[in-house]
Image (spheres, grey):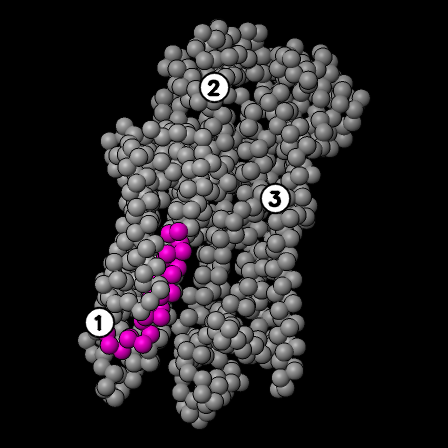
């Protein structure tokens, strides 16, 4: 089902991403091999001039990558109307083997792109471009990932057959389904809730710790790591208890349906702050890695404090909103 | 160029951008207005369709399978591709096997015509 | 923060001034850009409106329609089938439908002739008819007028037109002629005891498909169409159409991207001098790129908004624009459908990706080239 406007939009973005990733490789290789700011040779001057273009291009590709994830989810949701058995994005993504692979690859690529953009921002904030080499090594590593993340949705949509009968989210996220999604749905609400709030509290605390003072690498790493853990446990918590609470139905565990208009798009209230906060956690992790670079000593702490503050605020918001959702729900968990 | 001129120009452009943006936002209000105003018509049409047991909307009438898209059989001639354009111009509006239903699986599928 | 804002404002001012100095070129770009946006937007708005309209009005169509197939073609359904269908659990009521196509030799078009089901508000008496608005218009009929139909046996069937179906229902009834069951059988020589197809009503929507499966297993010569299938048919129809138009549009999009690329890279002498001056007074490449980014953003914003607005007005307020046929398809008894807009943010986002992203991608390299040019090289020409 390639001939759908949103799918074509996705294709366009994927094609641009892959084209940029491919075009950047030779340049990235020559940077990694020859970059030397002390050198005044013509090659170095040319490299320096080029690097601005290339980092703009890569930033553009990463920006597209960040945009691709929501477009993929939306498109899948929209196509559910054309697939028999599908009620929301889950049904569509489940219609062939590439669906959830594409979604997972997109999520990984999303945070990878976010991290790269942070590297880029840190690099250009210092006149000596201390991270240029690392940045392009990262770009080289990311290129195949980006290509994979771009290719999987294409394969998914190309192979999507409208006549195929898929199973809806109620079945994918049923507690007796023999899969990861099933296991998450079967996770009892009690422990899930404890993991949810404890990990959120940890992420908020560690982030606040970084946000309030000039802290070292270890605290930043801790805050970033705690953020990623919180991300995972929030997703698990959504499936386990938050989604059923929103739907007022203990048996409905779908983490996508509450993005729909029927549920007043409540999902965004959780996912937007969650993704923003996690992106900032990713940056904190990057910052903790980059802290070794002496040239960044002046710039880094300030950015780090800002990122930590945003992460803390985002995770707090997630905790607050999910508590409100739980309080408003009529569902009682054992 | 004097600073005053530059400011005035940018103000004018800002005004244009603001007007256009207001126009786009205005379409949303217009949409809500039209939907509200035609709600009664939609309700009447919904009842009419239920009352007459209608299954299709009347968009094009140049071929039976185009008039009743959801009722046409999957192997009506000229239905097996967008190429039906020459034969029936609305054919370009309907994709190949645009009306696949699950129950088709229970009908022996004609080998030559299906993609 | 304030410093950042001030910087952006100054950059925007410079960008504006620069655009304003090349007024004709900027206008040309804007017009082409807006045109590209509006064509894509018109197709998308139109298709979505039709899709939602169909979804809205058909939400209460029969739960399951049972057709009979014989040698791969539709066959009339004997009423013994209706009895058997009634026995299926979950089926609330069973009704034979009588409908068909009548080829009108004068109009040279097929219209739909239908018998309103019993208990409907539109049941007509023998010798009477109700006609849909497009048929009435094409044949010049009004309430009280005479409708002449030629039967299969070449006799003339004279019917008095009771009333015209309202214009507002054209999306459903434009080409409809409602007559009585007896007249229907006379018109088509339709054997008694047979129906065109059978409509089932099923109380529980979750059971529609299960009932349909039971029908096709118990009666292997039938085909069952579930209400959900109808919805999917209309969802797919115009999506496919949109996609096809957009694919055909790829060439235009590519040409537009090339145009934008060319325009952005073929800097005029004035423009080059401008950038050289800026660099000479201390701007670095980053500032120039930011300024150029502002230029691009302004152009995109204006073109996108103007294009979208034009498409909206064109689709929903111009009754039959010049491209109506290309969007709508052709038919002699054309329904006059007033579309109700039904857009959403995702559609706007898709449109944005399909128009602004290619433009942005196309100007990246030229912008960089302008930004890194050395002032002395430029000044010397």
Which of pointers 3 and 2 lies earlier in the amino acid sequence?
2
Q: Can residue A17 be seen at all in this image of the molecule?
A: no
Q: Main secondary structure of the magenta part?
A: helix
| Crowding near the residue tagged with mark 2, few <14, some 14–19, many ≥20 C-alpha atoms within 10 Å | few
Residue C52 higher or lower than C29, as above or below? above
**Where residue A167 sits: x, y (%)?**
35, 31
Compare residues C248 and A181 and report the one nearer the observer: A181
Residue A38 higher or lower than A184, as above or below? below
- Name which residue lies at 29% across and 30% down: A175
Q: Is residue C317 magenta?
A: no
Disc number lying in front (3 or 1): 1
Secondary structure at numbered mark 2: loop
| Crowding near the residue tagged with mark 1, few <14, some 14–19, many ≥20 C-alpha atoms within 10 Å | few
Q: Quadrant location of residue A250?
A: top left
Whether callout 1 and callout 2 share a subunit is answered no
Q: Quadrant location of residue B3?
A: bottom right
- According to the picture, the residue beneath numbered tag 1 turns out to be A292
The subunit letter for the residue under badge 1 reads A
Whether the residues at callouts 1 and 2 have beta carbons within 8 Å, the answer is no
Whether the residues at callouts 3 and 1 have beta carbons within 8 Å, the answer is no
**Number of numbered discs visible in the structure rendering:** 3
- Name which residue lies at 27% across and 28% down: A176
- According to the picture, the residue beneath numbered tag 3 turns out to be C341
Residue B58 higher or lower than B3, as above or below? above
- Name which residue lies at 36% across and 36% down: A241
- Name which residue lies at 24% across and 31% down: A178
The subunit letter for the residue under badge 3 reads C
**Where residue C364 sits: x, y (%)?**
42, 70
Magenta residues, start to end: A293-316
- According to the picture, the residue beneath numbered tag 2 turns out to be C204
**Where residue C68 sits: x, y (%)?**
46, 16
Residue A156 higher or lower than C376, as above or below? above
């Amino acid at each position: 089902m390639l001939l759908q406007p949103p799918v074509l939009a996705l294709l366009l973005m994927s094609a641009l991403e892959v084209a940029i990733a491919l075009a950047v490789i030779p340049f990235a290789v020559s940077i990694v091999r020859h970059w030397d700011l002390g050198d005044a040779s013509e090659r170095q001057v040319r490299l320096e001039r080029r690097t601005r273009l290339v980092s703009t291009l890569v930033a553009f590709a990463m920006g597209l990558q960040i945009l691709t994830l929501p477009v993929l989810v939306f498109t899948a949701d929209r196509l559910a109307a054309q697939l028999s058995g599908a009620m929301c994005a889950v049904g569509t993504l489940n219609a062939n083997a590439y669906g959830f692979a594409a979604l997972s690859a997109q999520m990984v690529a999303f945070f990878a792109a976010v991290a790269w953009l942070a590297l880029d921002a840190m690099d250009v904030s210092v006149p000596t471009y201390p991270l240029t080499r690392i940045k392009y090594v990262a770009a080289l590593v990311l290129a195949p990932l980006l290509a994979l993340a771009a290719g999987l949705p294409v394969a998914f949509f190309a192979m999507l057959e409208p006549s195929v009968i898929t199973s809806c989210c109620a079945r994918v996220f049923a507690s007796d389904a023999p899969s990861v999604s099933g296991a998450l749905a079967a996770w009892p609400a009690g422990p899930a809730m404890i993991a949810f709030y404890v990990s959120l509290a940890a992420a908020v605390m560690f982030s606040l710790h970084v946000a309030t003072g000039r802290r070292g690498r270890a605290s930043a790493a801790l805050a970033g790591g705690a953020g990623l853990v919180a991300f995972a446990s929030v997703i698990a918590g959504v499936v386990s208890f938050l989604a059923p609470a929103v739907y007022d139905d203990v048996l409905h565990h779908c983490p996508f349906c509450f993005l729909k208009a029927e549920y007043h798009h409540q999902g965004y209230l959780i996912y937007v702050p969650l993704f923003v906060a996690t992106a900032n956690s990713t940056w904190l992790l990057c910052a903790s890695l980059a802290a070794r670079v002496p040239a960044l000593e002046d710039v880094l702490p300030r950015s780090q404090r800002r990122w930590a503050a945003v992460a803390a605020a985002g995770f707090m918001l997630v905790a607050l909103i999910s508590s409100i959702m739980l309080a408003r729900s009529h569902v009682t968990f054992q | 160029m004097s600073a005053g001129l530059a400011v005035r120009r940018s103000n004018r452009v800002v005004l244009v951008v603001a007007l256009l943006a207001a126009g786009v936002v205005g379409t949303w209000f217009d949409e809500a207005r039209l939907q509200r105003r035609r709600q009664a018509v939609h309700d009447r049409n919904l009842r009419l369709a239920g009352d007459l047991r209608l299954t299709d909307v009347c968009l094009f009438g140049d071929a039976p399978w185009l008039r009743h898209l959801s009722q046409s059989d999957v192997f009506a001639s000229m239905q097996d591709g967008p190429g039906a354009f020459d034969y029936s111009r609305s054919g370009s509006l309907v994709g190949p096997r645009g009306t696949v239903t699950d129950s088709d699986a229970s009908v022996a599928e004609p080998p030559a015509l299906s993609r | 923060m304030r410093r950042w804002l001030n910087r952006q404002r100054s950059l925007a001012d410079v960008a504006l001034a620069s655009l304003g100095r090349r007024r004709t070129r900027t206008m040309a770009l804007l017009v082409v850009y807006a045109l590209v946006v509006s064509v894509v937007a018109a197709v998308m708005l139109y298709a979505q409106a039709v899709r939602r309209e169909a979804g809205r009005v058909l939400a209460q169509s029969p739960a399951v329609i049972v057709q009979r197939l014989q040698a791969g073609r539709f066959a009339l359904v004997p009423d013994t089938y209706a009895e058997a269908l009634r026995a299926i659990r979950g089926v609330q009521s069973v009704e034979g439908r009588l409908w068909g196509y009548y080829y009108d030799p004068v109009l040279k078009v097929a219209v739909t002739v239908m018998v309103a089901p019993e208990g409907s508000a539109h049941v007509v008496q023998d010798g009477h008819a109700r006609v849909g608005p497009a048929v009435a218009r094409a044949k010049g009929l009004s309430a009280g007028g005479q409708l002449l139909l030629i039967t299969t046996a070449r006799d003339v069937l004279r019917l008095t037109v009771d009333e015209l179906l309202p214009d507002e229902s054209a999306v459903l009834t434009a080409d409809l002629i409602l007559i009585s069951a007896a007249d229907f059988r006379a018109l088509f020589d339709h054997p008694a005891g047979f129906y065109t197809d059978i409509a089932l009503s099923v109380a529980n929507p979750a059971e529609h498909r299960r009932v349909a499966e039971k029908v096709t297993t118990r009666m292997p010569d039938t085909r069952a169409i579930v209400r959900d299938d109808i919805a999917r048919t209309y969802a797919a129809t115009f999506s496919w159409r949109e996609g096809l138009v957009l694919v055909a549009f790829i060439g235009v999009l590519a040409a537009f991207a090339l145009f934008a690329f060319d325009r952005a890279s073929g800097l005029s002498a004035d423009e080059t001098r401008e950038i050289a001056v800026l660099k000479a007074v201390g701007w670095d490449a980053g500032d120039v790129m930011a300024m150029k980014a502002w230029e691009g953003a302004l152009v995109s914003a204006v073109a996108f908004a103007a294009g979208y607005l034009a498409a909206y007005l064109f689709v929903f307020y111009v009754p039959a624009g010049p491209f109506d046929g290309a969007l709508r398809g052709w038919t002699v008894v054309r329904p006059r459908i007033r579309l109700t807009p039904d857009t959403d943010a995702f559609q706007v986002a898709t449109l944005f990706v399909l128009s602004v992203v290619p433009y942005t991608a196309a100007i990246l390299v030229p912008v960089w080239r302008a930004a890194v040019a050395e002032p002395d090289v430029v000044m010397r020409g």
